[in-house]
C-alpha cells in the first residue's frame, strides 16, 4: 500500500493528539476520552461523547490491513447504526489506490459500498418501498426504508457525526448493484456496492492502532 499521509490535530476535549489518515474524514472519535470531534479548518470541534460499541465478531478492526480482490486496504473507523429491528456496522476502508469504501456488516453478511456523486435533485417524497425511482442517473428499485440512529462509533468517520444523530436509511438495487442512501439533517449521501464473501477478504495479523 502506498504511504499514507497523516495530519495530527488535538482532541477538542482532552487535548490528546489524534492522527487523521484520510482527506475524506469528517469526524474522528478520540480513543482516550470518547469525544466525537468534527474536523474544522481551525482544528477539532468537540460534539459530545460517543457511546462505546459492544464487541461482536468481525474480521475488521481499526488499524488492521487487508486485501480484497487484489487491492490492499486499511481500516480507519466504524459506525454502528441502530434501527427498530436491530443494528448494523459500517467500516470505513481506505484502499491503496486512494478510493474510500464502506464495508457494511449485518446479520453475518458483508457488503462493500463506494460513494456515488449526486448530480441531480432527488424527489424524496416519491420514494416508496416497492417503487422504482430515478436516483443519481439510475433506476433504483426500493426494498427498504427505515429510521435509524447512531449508536456508537470509533476512529475516523466519513460523516459529520454527532452522538445519537438521527437519519433515514434507504436501500434498493439498480442493474444488479446494491444502493444505499442516508439522509441526515444537513447531508444526503448515496453509495452503490455489492455483496462480498468473507473468504475473499484476506486480513493481515491484527495490530493495536494506539500502540
Image (tube, helix red, strand yellow):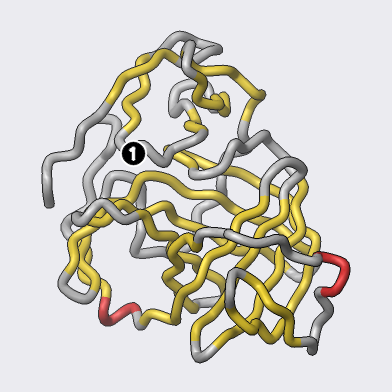
Q: Residue farthest to the left?
A: 2
Give the image quarter of residue 3: top left
Label 1 secondary element? loop
Quarter holding the C terminus is: top left
The image shows residue 90, relative to residue 29, as above or below, that is below
Q: Residues within 10 Å of mark 1 (few under 14, many from 20)?
A: many
Compared to residue 80, the image places residue 171 above or below, namely: below
View extreme (front): residue: 120
Query: Does 177 sit above or below residue 159?
Result: below
Q: Left or right: 168 with respect to 56?
A: right
Query: At which x and y percent is residue 77?
Result: 42, 45
| Residue that mark 1 sits on | 22
Q: Quadrant of residue 97?
A: bottom left
Q: Nearer the viewer, residue 167 or 63?
A: 167
Q: Is residue 108 above or below residue 94?
A: below
- Tell me what residue is drawn at x 68 percent, y 36 percent: 163
Which residue corresponds to the image point at 33% horizontal and 51% vertical from the top-left? 75
Q: Can you give x and y, in whole percent of width and height, for residue 162 in the image?
A: 67, 34
Of residues 50 and 70, the one drawn nearer to the viewer in this rendering = 70
Q: Is residue 161 left or right of residue 69?
A: right
- Residue 98: x %, y % from top left: 26, 51
- Kindly give the residue lying farthest to the right in the view shown: 125
x 87%, y 67%: residue: 125
Q: Nearer the viewer, residue 118 or 4?
A: 118
Q: How many marks?
A: 1
Q: Is residue 148 left or right of residue 101?
A: right
- The residue located at (72%, 41%) in the rendering is 186
Amino acid at each position: 500500500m502506498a504511504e499514507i499521509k497523516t495530519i495530527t490535530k488535538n482532541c477538542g476535549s482532552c487535548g490528546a493528539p489524534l492522527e487523521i489518515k484520510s482527506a475524506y474524514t469528517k469526524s474522528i472519535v478520540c480513543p482516550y476520552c470518547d469525544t466525537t470531534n468534527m474536523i474544522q479548518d481551525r482544528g477539532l470541534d468537540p460534539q459530545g461523547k460517543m457511546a462505546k460499541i459492544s464487541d461482536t465478531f468481525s474480521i475488521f478492526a481499526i488499524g488492521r490491513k487487508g486485501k480484497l480482490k487484489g487491492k490492499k486496504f486499511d481500516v480507519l473507523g466504524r459506525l454502528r447504526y441502530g434501527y427498530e429491528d436491530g443494528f448494523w456496522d459500517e467500516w470505513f476502508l481506505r484502499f491503496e489506490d486512494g478510493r474510500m469504501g464502506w464495508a457494511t456488516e449485518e446479520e453475518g453478511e458483508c457488503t462493500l459500498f463506494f460513494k456515488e456523486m449526486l448530480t441531480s435533485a432527488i424527489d424524496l417524497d416519491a420514494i416508496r418501498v416497492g417503487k422504482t425511482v430515478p436516483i443519481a442517473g439510475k433506476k433504483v428499485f426500493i426494498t427498504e426504508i427505515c429510521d435509524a440512529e447512531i449508536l456508537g462509533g470509533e476512529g475516523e468517520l466519513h460523516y459529520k457525526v454527532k452522538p445519537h444523530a438521527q437519519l433515514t436509511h434507504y436501500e434498493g438495487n439498480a442493474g444488479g448493484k446494491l444502493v444505499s442512501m442516508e439522509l441526515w439533517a444537513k447531508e444526503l449521501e448515496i453509495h452503490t456496492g455489492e455483496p462480498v464473501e468473507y473468504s475473499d477478504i484476506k486480513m493481515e495479523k491484527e495490530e493495536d492502532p494506539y500502540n
